Amino acid sequence: MLLLAFSLSAGAQNDISAKAECPDGLAIYISSKNKIYLGLPENMLSRKLLFGGCVSRVSDPGVANTGQRPSGPLQCVIASVEDSLVVLRRPQVAGTSPDSLYSRAMARNFDAPILRRMPILSREGGRVMFEITPFVIKAAPRGNDFKPGSEDGTCWYYEPKAFEDNASVKLCQSFEAEGLGGKATASMTSTVSVLVLPSVPMRAKLQDSRIGTFSTGSLAGGNRYELTAARDGLHPYRLANRWRLEPVDTVAWMRGEKVCVSKPIVWWIDDSFPESWKKPIAEGVLAWNAAFEAFGLKDVLQVRSFPVDDPCFDPDNLKYNCIRYIPNATANAMGPSWADPETGEIVSASVLIFNDVVRLLNNWRFVQTAQVDRRVRSMKMPDEVISEALLYAVSHEIGHTLGMLHNMAGSAAIPVDSLRSPAFTAIHGTTASIMDYARFNYVAQPTDTLVSLVPPSLGEYDKYVMEWLYKPVPQARDMWDESAISEQLIDSHEGDPFYRYAPQQSAMSAIQYDPTARTQDLGDDAIKAGDYGIANLKYILPNIQSWIEGDDDYSHRRQLYNQLCSQYSRYISNVSSLIGGIVLYKAKTGDACTPISSARQRSAVKWLVDQIGESSWLDNPDLTSHFGLQSPQSHQIASNVALYLSNSAPVAVATAFANGSDYDVSQYYDDLYKELFVSRRKLSPQLKTLQRSLVTAMCRRSTSAAKPAVPREGGICFGESVQPSQPSVDISHSSEAAVYREVFLKRVSRYARQHKSNPHFAYLYTLTKQ
């Protein structure tokens, strides 16, 4: 980077307050009037420009975080000179045609929209200079409480930098925002970069809905459309996002040699990370190289530390992929990426690791593995345990930056009892995919030894996706030809649970139909895994007092207790999804929709009622008496289960029945009545809460059916949309749930009258009279 003068008119030259120019690249200027100008080489006109912003510094981490980038697509423009003006257009990617017969019509109806026309300030020295302030403002990070503006004195620019194919400028702004301490004045510095994309675009790859990848459609967010004489109608499609990984020697690669790629993915690790974190973070990145080496590409991912004395390096510039340390209380990590909207090429990515992700990992490791791992029985986890957990978290986030969506079917590929096998877990860990939310091995029992307790750095599914997404196909003529060749890999694994993809079901939906695509579950049998997990929680809970030392105010014990109750609730929820459950498969011959058997659904109803009836152990007064005033957790969970059984489960059962299940709503209500009333001669307090909450919820239940999440589209989708959560379906026109709910309530009322002399059911008689 050099700071040099640019050939401007005398008036314009006097207006410049800061400037930067690269001799063979871009130039960027800041005017005294708070305007930003770009000097674009003539030979780069008609190249795509990507604008994007990154938070560099912030006064309140409750507002934003250093390293954070705005969500959504980048501003992508093409510059051309027309009639003494620079015309900036958005690339047209919505409609294409390979046939000359249709190409003219497509060009007229899918023209590139004009975003701005800017006057040329200078056209000397082989560059065109024009204003880009509106694009800088639009690309800058923004939030609900703040957005950049350049006219009111609360936003200003400084520190321009220019390089061969990109330029950047700092933007500082002050605003009123809701932060950690409430509403107050905050300030934030951002870096906005403009990046010139390659003159020869990467060949795009069609998305296949049997593989979970982030995708690129039209710039409006929908599908693209191709019109061809080969088929009737416009064909919708989307592109899979991926990095441009091309062998340096394709001939050697085709001979079977392992070769490097022309442009490896380099990850820069923040120098402010705790020293003990840096090694597992690097290992989490480099673990993915094994997937690429399996098909002949080596050293694809590389790791470097932030340089000490390099004036060109800027972690906030789009040119650098950085793993950033965020010292705040957020218990999370994230791995966003940005892609070229024309080809789906990933051009920049980042990973943010928040400090308190270790608190979350600490709690998970304790409640999921303390029964078998003595190392985690303390308030502070040893470095080796934190390293294991960090490696897992980073590998997961790097998977996102490589283009992968969550795959919630990964853990369901593994038989539950295999999770107790040292030999099996040494190879497979806890899941077939690091992109699952499989967490740690809560199935392992206290007597199990040498069992792996963590997910694998890479699972079979992850390696398979990398091969499909990145293995070169030099013989392909175009993306359609490549799709036909690449799909052979998917075809060869169809029906194998280790290679199955299931999208993440919406957390906002009242019902998640597919019990094999749950978050934070393990194994292929929710009931068996739940039995193992609950046995472990019963072992852990009474030992919390003695295992945790140095916690005089009981704050850490309370945190662990809350996590333990949440873990118990997950086991309950996993089994609940068997009621009305539908296993959903993406298949080449059409989407498979297989309801859970009636015997299995009946077992789930019985298991849930039995668990709630025996859940008093969860309240443990020896521990909870130190927490102050609170509601017993067992009763809260019983009430939550009642709401699910009364409201969501009947809709799920009705939907499954409409899709071929042998278990209908009348059978469900019969089983619920038998398990909750007829079979219970003596009620625990928790069962009374379950009965009372269930009946109360049913009496208040509206007749409108819920709209749960179930896929609508049928058949394999080549290049078409894959939603990270499944869309809804409405079966209210055919559901008999409301009718049988009334029948159920009348049966309960009769039962209460018949047993009103029994002190265990007297309260129920009183309730049904109201």
Image: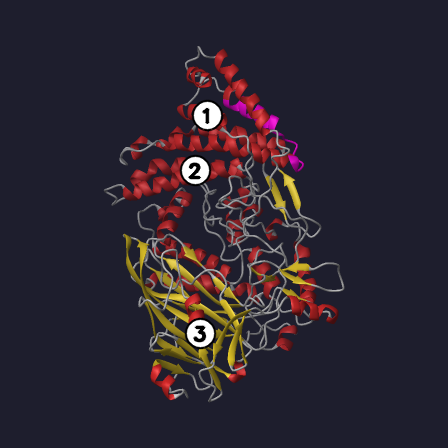
Secondary structure predominantly adopted by residues drawn in magenta: helix
Of 449 and 206, nearer the camera is 206
Q: What's the CA distance linking mark 2 and mark 3?
A: 55 Å
Q: Is residue 667 magenta?
A: yes
Q: Is residue 94 magenta?
A: no
Query: What range is drawn magenta here?
Result: 658-676
Q: Quick check: can you spot residue 317?
A: no
Disc 1: CA contacts within 10 A as few (<14), some (14-19) or many (>=20): some
* Whole-percent x, y for residue 66 in the image: 36, 63
* Whole-percent x, y for residue 39 in the image: 45, 81
Left or right, residue 500 beside residue 352: right
Mark 2 falls on what kind of element? helix
Mark 1 falls on what kind of element? helix
Location of residue 344 by image quarter: bottom right
Which numbered disc, 2 or 1, marks the residue closer to the eye? 1
Q: Which residue is mark 2?
A: 568
Q: Which residue is mark 3?
A: 132
Mark 3 falls on what kind of element? loop
Please identify the quadrant where the N terminus is shown: bottom left
* Whole-percent x, y for residue 186 in the image: 29, 60
Q: What's the CA distance linking mark 1 and mark 3?
A: 61 Å
Q: Which residue is mark 1?
A: 696
Left or right, residue 320 beside residue 403: left
- What residue is rendered at 64% in x and 72% in y? 256
